[in-house]
Amino acid sequence: MQVFNVTGMSCGHCERAVIQAIQALDPAVQVQVDLAAGTVRVDSALDEQVIREAIEAEGYQVR
């Protein structure tokens, strides 16, 4: 399980955008977004940098 601290997420649309961006890379991936904590948990064999780039491509910053 990889955990990313993400800034800029504030609503359900943000949550869906991040989940869909990561699922486009791996349809079997498990993604959990916690808007209040600003975290994205990803259970996948995908490389951390690939996931980071997918999140950032949606307009969010990964810290």
Image: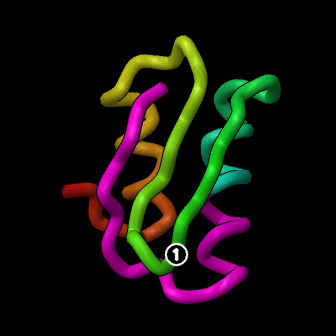
Q: In the orientation shown, which residue stands out farthest toward the right? A: 27
Residue 23: x, y in percent? 72, 38
Residue 28: x, y in percent? 80, 24
Category of crowding for the residue at label 1, using alpha-carbon neighbours closer than 10 angstroms: few (below 14), some (14–19), many (at least 20)? some
Q: In the rendered view of the protein, which quadrant contains the C terminus?
A: bottom left
Q: Which colour scheme is used?
A: rainbow
Residue 51 falls left or right of residue 7: right
Q: Does residue 22 lie above or below 59 as drawn?
A: above
Residue 47: x, y in percent? 41, 18
Number of marks in the rendered image? 1
Residue 54 falls left or right of residue 6: right
**Residue visible at 70% across and 25% down?**
26
Q: Name the residue under label 1.
A: 35
Q: Does residue 23 lie above or below 43 as drawn?
A: below
**Is residue 3 found inside the magenta-colored segment of the image?**
yes
Q: What stretch is highlighted in magenta?
A: 1-18
Going by the numbered disc 1, the residue's amino acid type is Leu
**Residue visible at 66% across and 65% down?**
17
Question: In front: 10, or 21?
Answer: 10
Residue 31, by quadrant, is top right
**Residue visible at 51% across and 87% down?**
10
Q: In the orientation shown, which residue stands out farthest toward the top? A: 45
**Residue visible at 31% across and 29% down?**
49
Element under disc 1: loop
**Is residue 63 found inside the magenta-colored segment of the image?**
no
Residue 16: x, y in percent? 72, 66
Q: Does residue 40 lie above or below 38 as drawn?
A: above
